Image: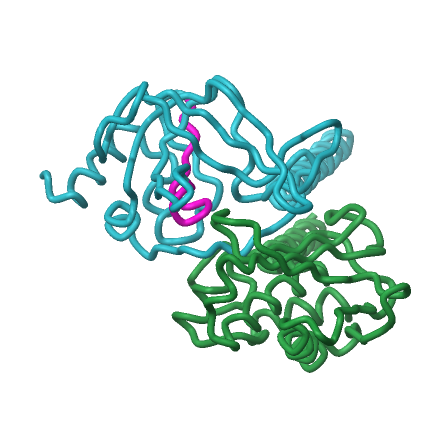
Chain colours: A cyan, B green
Amino acid sequence: MLSLKIQNKKFHVVAALFLITAITVATINFLPSKSETKANASWVNHYTDTKALTDKSDLIVIGKVIDSVPEKRVDMIFTMQNIKIDKYVKGEKVADDTVKVLQTGGELNGKKTVEFEDSPLFKINDKYLLFLEKTTEGYYLVSGGYQGLGKIVDGKVKVNVDGDEIGKVFKNKSIEDVEDIISKDLGKK
Amino acid sequence: MKRKIMKISLLTIVLCVAISSFAYAHTFGGKWGSNVGWWLDSSNSYYSTFQSATSHWNNAANNVSYYQTTMTSATVIPTVDFYGSTGWDGYGKPGPDPFSGTYTYGEVKLNRTYTDNYASNKKVAVATHELGHILGLAHTGTTSYQSIMYNSAGYAYDNWGIYYPVSHDTTDINNLYP
């Protein structure tokens, strides 16, 4: 009788733990994080495979953010990110191995305007794989808005959106594997 | 004991189904407590674009709608301007907090640097997409199925020919405002 009661108690404890774990996992995975950016953009360019993304990019580089300069346009704040290039995967060497990449969002004179959930502002000293398109104004934009952007963490590429054709391919790949894919897309392999 | 196992199993299945449904629905987390008043000067060249876009959502949603009102009463006043090369043709942000609570205003911008070169229905696609955000819908992040709320409204228009809410969007908006 006593052993049956203990078994019942154990069963309830296990069941309760299981439910708590399931709810916690669901919450962590599916609730949007408030620390993330607050707006969603509609991106102009969109690519349906890595070859198109590679072909349309003027530069593909691995680099580190060394400086962020906010600027105002109309009623919004943008940030010009200065990226020191460590490695060129596609494209010709640029002056001082430094490239300017415009992102939406930032802070100027104590005022902040929106940044985008799938393209959050780069942080100084963080390292990124960047597919870049040159604008007529001379600076660069990330190709496909969020598609040509991967933060490098522990040698792996972290994408912001993993449900589309690009994100599915690059998600959690090592930087070597991604370079290999780009080389094949460029016809080098 | 068997009955308890059955109960726990059933509960787990219900929980999993609930979690899956939540994951499939692409919403921010907040919503409006009433219908949404919008205003744009009728002389604005994008006035008819927003008229079409709001009508599309009114046709799709059963229990929330956009209505035209005065500038002073409107909680959504789209801004249409030239922001230069930014990579985006529009954005939408419900406020104060997109991720929770009751919305009291919506911020919508279209970037004419790009949209002035679009066909009229592609402009409507971007406006409809942004107004979907204002109602509380998030990006779908996948091309596995069609949606005006895919991360690029231009892609939805160019590849799927849509500039209005489709099945997935109608389900999402009516789940958000049952």
Residue A52 in the figure: left or right of residue A66: left
Q: Which residues are magenta?
A: A141-153
Residue B22, percent from left and from top: 64, 56
Residue B15, percent from left and from top: 67, 53
* Quadrant assignment for the C terminus of chain A: top left
When the figure is inspected, residue B58 is found, relative to residue B146, above or below; the finding is below
When the figure is inspected, residue A113 is found, relative to residue A152, above or below; the finding is below
Residue A2, percent from left and from top: 77, 29
Residue depicted at x 81% and y 56%: B105
Residue depicted at x 52% and y 20%: A124
Q: Is residue A144 magenta?
A: yes
Q: Nearer the viewer, residue A86 or A49?
A: A86
* Quadrant assignment for the N terminus of chain A: top right
Residue depicted at x 72% and y 55%: B107
When the figure is inspected, residue A115 is found, relative to residue B14, above or below; the finding is above
Residue A62 in the figure: left or right of residue B61: left
Residue depicted at x 77% and y 34%: A5
Q: Residue A85: which quarter of the image? A: top left
Q: Nearer the viewer, residue B155 or B72?
A: B72
Residue A176 seen from this side? yes
Q: Nearer the viewer, residue B118 or A118?
A: B118
Residue A25 seen from this side? no
Residue B6, percent from left and from top: 66, 55
